[in-house]
Structures are given as structure tokens and as C-alpha cells.
Amino acid sequence: MSQTQLPITTLLTNFATNGTKQITGTQLRDFVVSAPNVVATITALRTITPPGPCSVSVNGNAVAGDGGGGAFYWGATLVSPAVYTDDGNTVIIPGGSIGSTGENAWLLAWPLRLNPTAVQTSAYTALWGDFVLCDTTSAAFTVTLPTAPQDGTRVGVKIVTFGTGHNVTVATAGSDVFNKSGGSTTLTLQVLNQGVILQYQAATRVWVVMDALPYSAIAGGVTSFNTRTGAVVPATSDYSFAQISGTAGLAQGGTNANLAATGGSNQVLQQSSSGAAVTPRSRGRPAAPGGRP
């Protein structure tokens, strides 16, 4: 049979039709594996039960282009586990719905998007396609990447709630490393909303950092205070003078001296030389007319 670009639904119809359009299961399997067959949505995928091993590309979840879907392959009884549960995303039972079970299912091989996890608060081992959301309010913890996954696997990690001093460590497993052969095996996320997206290169066993906001870029300049930007007006929860220790320097408009135990009546501030600390002294008697003491 000529390998004309036909959608999988047409092929299945032809397979079931008597007459000149009929093809064998082996022909259909070979055609489907080699041809770039496309299904619009997960809903459409549920209507397809192929006669043998094959794979298809699904362009969306509810609507083509909505970011869902991905590359699916047909998992038969011999593929572990023997019974699948439909989750509406990575496992699809033909003719079923979320929660349905069956011995055959469409299994997600490669997602079109990263799938956000539940918010993690302790050590977590990521799966391919995970976008791991992290809350470090209580403690720091480690997110471990999959070990030697398939080529092109992507994983994302991000801090969505941050506890001061509680970082997220992203760690490789096995002999995998970051960015290059001989590279590091850990990286650290250490501020709110910092994240990283990684893609795996199977040939070199390297996780390449595709997109990340480094801490140095965040720490390079402060553009807000207590979540406020622009002109900062003191508000409740700001630091008060009572909470600040030490002395303010001359360049900051201070005296460069602690005047807490000095002063009193008839005192003035003086500076003995340029750049010296400003200290109090007795003012003495008022000057006489004409400038004479």
C-alpha cells in the first residue's frame, strides 16, 4: 500500500471495510508507526481503538492548540501495568472517561506542555513532564530529576511560596549531570518565584538548563521594599529606628556617633575636623554684642 498521508481515523475505517479498501493489521500497524498521524483532541483519541501497536500525535486536550495533548502510543496487555486507569491526561481508555480502567490504553509518551504538580513541601522525585511547584515555608528540600529518561524529556521546578533561608535543591540522579559532561549534579533555587526548565540529552546523559532566572540577576538591584515599588511610604511591619542598631554615617546624614548617653541642657553639636564624628559640647555663655565673648 502506498504510504499516502491519511489520518488514523480513515485508516481504521478502511481496515474495517470489505472490498478493495481492506488492508491487513500488519499493514495498518506499519503504516501508522511510520506516518505522522494526527488526532485533534483527547476526546477524539477516546474514539480510536487500533488493531495493533501504533502512535499518534494529539494536538490538544479539549480543543486543538490549548496546550494539552502530546505524543501517545498504544499500550497493550503485555505492557506493565496489566490494568490501566484513565486520568484524562497521560492515560486514555478508548470509549472510557476519567477513572475508567482497561487492559489497553493510549499512553502519553511526550507531552506538549509541562504538567504542574500539586504543591510540594518536602523531598520529591520528579516524573518526565512534571512542572514541580515548591513551598519552602517549613523547610528546605530537594527535587530529584528522573534517572536517564528518554531523550528530550523536560522537567520544570519553581518556588511558589518561600520560607526565608529555605532553598530548593534540584539534583540529578545516577550519572546524569547539568549542562555538560563533567558538569555539576545540583543547582539551587533560593528566592520566591525563581524557577528552572530543563531538557534531557540522552546521548550525553546531560540535563540542559533551557530557561532559568539566576539568583545573581535577582540580587543585582532592589526595586521594591516589602512588596512596594516606587515612592516608599513607611507602613506597619517596616523596620523602626528602635529595631536598627549601630550608627548612621556622615554620608547618610548621620553623626557617626552614638549620642544616646550624651547631651543635656545648653548643648550643641560640633565637629572637630572634616569627616570626624559629630559630638555634643557645652554651648557656653551667649556671645556679647560685637562678637566678643
Image: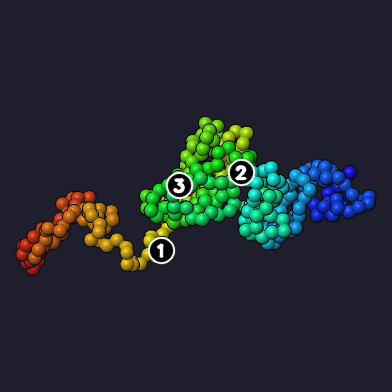
The residue that appears at 47% across and 39% down in the rendered structure is: 186
Front-lying residue, 32 or 172: 32
Q: Which picture quadrant has residue 42?
A: bottom right
Disc 3 marks which amino acid?
Answer: Ala
The residue that appears at 68% across and 50% down in the rendered structure is: 103
Is the N terminus in the top left, top right, bottom left or bottom right quadrant? top right
Q: Which picture quadrant has residue 266?
A: bottom left
Label placed on residue 33? none
Whether residues under marks 2 and 3 lie with C-beta atoms below 8 angstroms apart, the answer is: no
Q: Is residue 86 above or below residue 236?
A: above
Direction from residue 140 to residue 278 in the image, left or right: left
Label placed on residue 153? 2
Q: Nearer the viewer, mark 2 or mark 3?
A: 3
Q: Residues within 10 Å of mark 3 (few under 14, many from 20)?
A: some
Residue 64 in view of the camera: no
Separation (CA) of disc 2 from disc 1: 39 Å
Label placed on residue 123? 3
Direction from residue 251 to residue 27 in the image, left or right: right
Label placed on residue 228? 1
Disc 2 marks which amino acid?
Answer: Thr
Q: Residue 49 placed where, x, y %?
A: 76, 53
Q: Residues within 10 Å of mark 2 (few under 14, many from 20)?
A: many
Q: Residue 6 placed where, x, y %?
A: 83, 51
Disc 1 marks which amino acid?
Answer: Arg
Q: Residue 8 placed where, x, y %?
A: 80, 52
Q: Earlier in the sequence, mark 2 or mark 1?
A: 2
